[in-house]
Image (cartoon, rainbow, N blue to C red):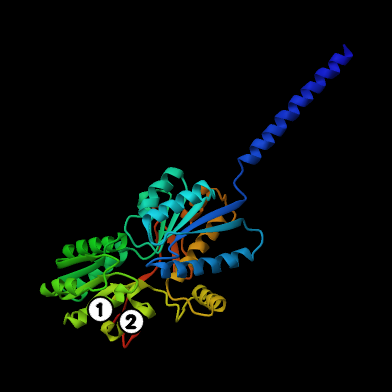
Amino acid sequence: MRQNGVSLRMAKVLVMLVVIISALFHFGCTQPPQELKIGIILPQTGYSAFVGDAVRKGIDLAYEQYSDQSGLPEITLIYEDSAGDVKQAVSAYHKLTSIDKVSAIICVSTGAKALAPLADRDNIVLFCTAVSASDIAGLSPWCFRFFISADVDARMMAEYAVERKGYKKLGVLYINDEMGLSYNNVFSDNVNRLGGEIVASEGFGFEVTDFKPILLKIAETQPDAVYIQAYDTSIGRIPVQMREIGLNVPILSVGTISQPEIMAQAGDTLEETVYTTCAFNTFAPETPELKAFVDSFTTKYSAPPIFFEVFGYDTFMMFKTAVEGNDISPEGIRTGLLAIKDIPLAAGVVSVGEDGEVSFPVILKQIKNGQWAPLE
């Protein structure tokens, strides 16, 4: 009997040990991951590779600074090339989520609208930067967007054109993609709302280099000004060809037109051009955050940052803010990003809205004597 009693007690002890070990195993398996994997889909090749290259340099600098600190969650960055193609961006998303098991994806330039429903289905953070199309953040509670937007920029430009300058007849020339269509729609809606008229609205594809047939159609409508939406070398060709056909009306545009390589390409045809852009100026940094970024970037790359680099840097800095002291699961990252309010970054004071839209200062500037200048 005694032997049987001992055996019974031993059996109970064994059962308890099994229960404890199982509980500990389960507890450990359900803890937040100790490593955060972030997938980054950007154009490393193709027409917008210059955007991807600039954003990546900014991200890599911020990541390097983050990695030098101790006591923070480990972060791994995994880059994939979209080549500026939506289908390739979708393929990259599937690879990152199914094979690499990332907890968040940064989408740069191309593919945001196609990736949003996938991120919504998978409950994974999709952070879009260098993406100007409207309504991206509103597509899913898992989507965030950090860049100048059609909703802000195009409305601001319409108000400037109609209310401040008194232009009544506006022509629009836009690249036929998500960005161009969004800007065309928002600008046109606001011009009409304010009592102006869109007398010509012409889209074009990436392959177009001869814009004169389109510009001649716009010239026939005798616009008071032309609003140009484009990037890469096309935005530098358009002003030159406008002047060549005798279309000498004022030019309105976006910040891309003020990129040094575009200004060099277009020369004095850009004189007096008015454009929307961010308040920051990397060549005359006014805040400690922007100056520190410019100095660090110039030291690392032996060249100053221009524009897109700031968005790459601040994108990673927002992830850093979101994960410090927080759960680094997808839901934890999402919660941390939504909690960002009025923090000073290189782009200015940044806040994340409840809809995932990131706000920061945007202004109007002009080109005078071949230089960036405040709007008079």
Secondary element at image label 2: helix
Is residue 335 visible in this depiction of the protein?
no
Is residue 318 visible in this depiction of the protein?
yes
Q: Looking at numbered disc 1 in the image, what kind of residue is underneath it? A: Pro
Q: Position of residue 166 (x, y in %)?
A: 16, 75
Quarter the C terminus occupies: bottom left
Please report the residue visible at 50 percent of the width from the left and 55 percent of the height from the top. 39
Residue density around tag 2, few if under 14, some if 14–19, many if 20 or more, within 10 Å = some
Q: Looking at numbered disc 2 in the image, what kind of residue is underneath it? A: Gln
Q: Where is residue 237 in the image (x, y as percent from the top left)?
A: 28, 77
Which residue is denoted by mark 1 in the rendering?
239
Q: Distance between the residues labelled 1 and 2?
A: 10 Å
Give whichever of discs 1 and 2 has the lower sequence position: 1
Which residue is denoted by mark 2 in the rendering?
265
Q: Where is residue 136 in the image (x, y as percent from the top left)?
A: 36, 55
- Left or right position of 322 against 69: left
Please report the residue visible at 45 percent of the width from the left and 51 percent of the height from the top. 93
